[in-house]
Amino acid sequence: MNTVYIVDDDQIVLDDFTLRENHFMSCGFEICRVHTNPRTARREIRKMRPDVVFSDLKMPGLTGIELLESLRRGSTPPPLFVIISAYNEFKDVRKFFTIHRGFDYILKPVSDRDLTELLARLSARLNMLPTVKITTTPSRDLNEILKYLREYPTMNHTLESLGALFSINPNTVCNLFSKHLKTTFIAFLTSLRLERASDLLLNTDLSVKDVGINCGYNSYFYFARVFTKTYGKPPTEYRETMR
């Protein structure tokens, strides 16, 4: 499990996240701590060294960007940083990405869909691996799951759906990926889909939108964003330069 620390001066927001703890776990993340005081959070983050920090943008005493600045100075490597805010403030968002290299920015109230997409991209960044090199593992159950995912990579898979299909507890499925592949189910599936996308971009004349759809991404913009974060180039540029 990758770990997430969440800091927001609004306890209601923190409660909303903790109530969705199973949502985090299904994507391979564990909420290790939450706090309303950003200065206390900063001390704890330096000690606990979580993989990801979710932080409110506007907090008394220490803003989210100030928290990010101080953590980058004192943490090696620093955690991936996500700003959560009720306000879409362009200047702060631009500064967050261009100067401080933040991972993402998400608006409150955070929907389940937005949270799932965000966690999938975080998981892909933290746990990406070359799936084509993985043939078999010591686990018969996991081998069957991997074979199934390779045959049907575009379906709307979840830990729960895989557990039901193979008569395995969803937490056991999660643990199999962690134990034998050192990654998460979401990261593996994302890697699988993006490898397929790379192949289609280089070896077919499908439009970029259709490539995304053929790889399980109904949103062109989400597909382009995930692909760019992984390969370092937008799909169109990747096709032009790699062919």
Image (cartoon, rainbow, N blue to C red):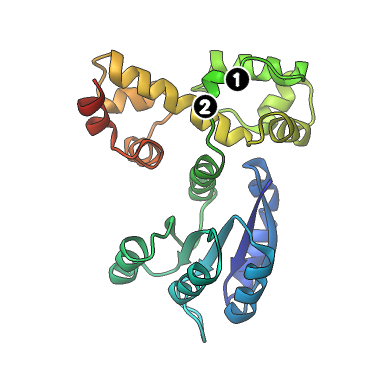
Write down the quadrant of residue 53 in the picture: bottom right
Q: Name the residue: 67% across, 15% down.
A: 136
* Residue corresponding to mark 2: 130
> In which quadrant is the C terminus drawn?
top left
The answer to whether 84 appears left or right of 47 in the picture is left
The circle on residue 134 is 1
Within 10 angstroms of label 1, few (less than 14), some, or many (20 or more) residues? few
> In which quadrant is the N terminus drawn?
top right
Badge 2 vs badge 1, beta-carbon distance below 8 Å: yes
The answer to whether 38 appears left or right of 91 in the picture is right
Q: Position of residue 62 (x, y in %)?
A: 50, 82
Q: Position of residue 164 (x, y in %)?
A: 73, 24
Q: Name the residue: 68% across, 68% down.
A: 47
Within 10 angstroms of label 2, few (less than 14), some, or many (20 or more) residues? few
Q: How many marks?
A: 2
Residue 83 higher or lower than 130, as above or below: below
Please name the amino acid that badge 1 sits on.
Ile
Residue 179 higher or lower than 211, as above or below: below
Decide which of 22, 101 is in the foreground and name it: 101
Q: Name the residue: 63% across, 19% down.
A: 146
Give SS at disc 2. loop
Decide which of 154, 180 is in the foreground and name it: 180
Q: Position of residue 156 (x, y in %)?
A: 54, 28
Give SS at disc 1. loop
Decide which of 123, 243 is in the foreground and name it: 243
